[in-house]
Amino acid sequence: MGDVVIAEMAKNPLEVIRIQRREYKNREFIDIRLFYQDDAGSWQPTRKGTTIHPDAWGDFMAALAKVEVDDAPPRRRRSRSRRT
């Protein structure tokens, strides 16, 4: 089968979140992973992500459906303190 990209969305100019069907050791998985653009302009996977067996996809989507944007905690900005 090989890897099939299902969707991709930009996180910022140098990173994308990619959802793809992957095959590993003759088993199929759904992979949701952060990719970064290297110096040559190629997209490389990071360790940030998860792999889900297709049998668990329905449960995963049901859990995501319960997430409400208003339920998300506010993002905290990192303070950049200057040392003198």
Image (cartoon, rainbow, N blue to C red):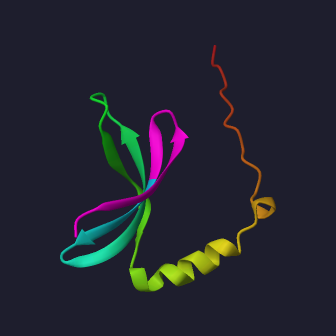
In the rendered image, the residue lying farthest to the right is: 70
Residue shown at the point (58%, 76%) measured from the top left: 61
Q: Is residue 27 rendered magenta in the image?
A: no
Residue 26 is left or right of residue 21, and the answer is left
In the displayed structure, 29 sits above or below 55; it is above
Horizontal and vertical percent position of residue 81? 67, 25
Quadrant for the C terminus in the image = top right
Residue 82 is left or right of residue 35, and the answer is right
Horizontal and vertical percent position of residue 78? 66, 37
Over which residues does the magenta segment extend? 1-17
Q: Is residue 16 rendered magenta in the image?
A: yes
Q: Quadrant of residue 66?
A: bottom right
Residue shown at the point (46%, 83%) measured from the top left: 56
In the displayed structure, 24 sits above or below 36; it is below
Horizontal and vertical percent position of residue 31? 39, 65
Quadrant for the N terminus in the image = bottom left
Number of on-image labels: 0
Residue 14 is left or right of residue 58, and the answer is left
Residue 74 is left or right of residue 51, and the answer is right
In the rendered image, the residue lying farthest to the left is: 25
Horizontal and vertical percent position of residue 79? 69, 32
In the displayed structure, 54 sits above or below 1; it is below
Q: Quadrant of residue 65?
A: bottom right
- Magenta segment, principal secondary structure? strand
In the rendered image, the residue lying farthest to the top is: 84
Q: Quadrant of residue 72?
A: bottom right
Residue shown at the point (46%, 41%) measured from the top left: 15
In the rendered image, the residue lying farthest to the bottom is: 55
Residue shown at the point (19%, 78%) measured from the top left: 26
In the displayed structure, 20 sits above or below 34; it is below
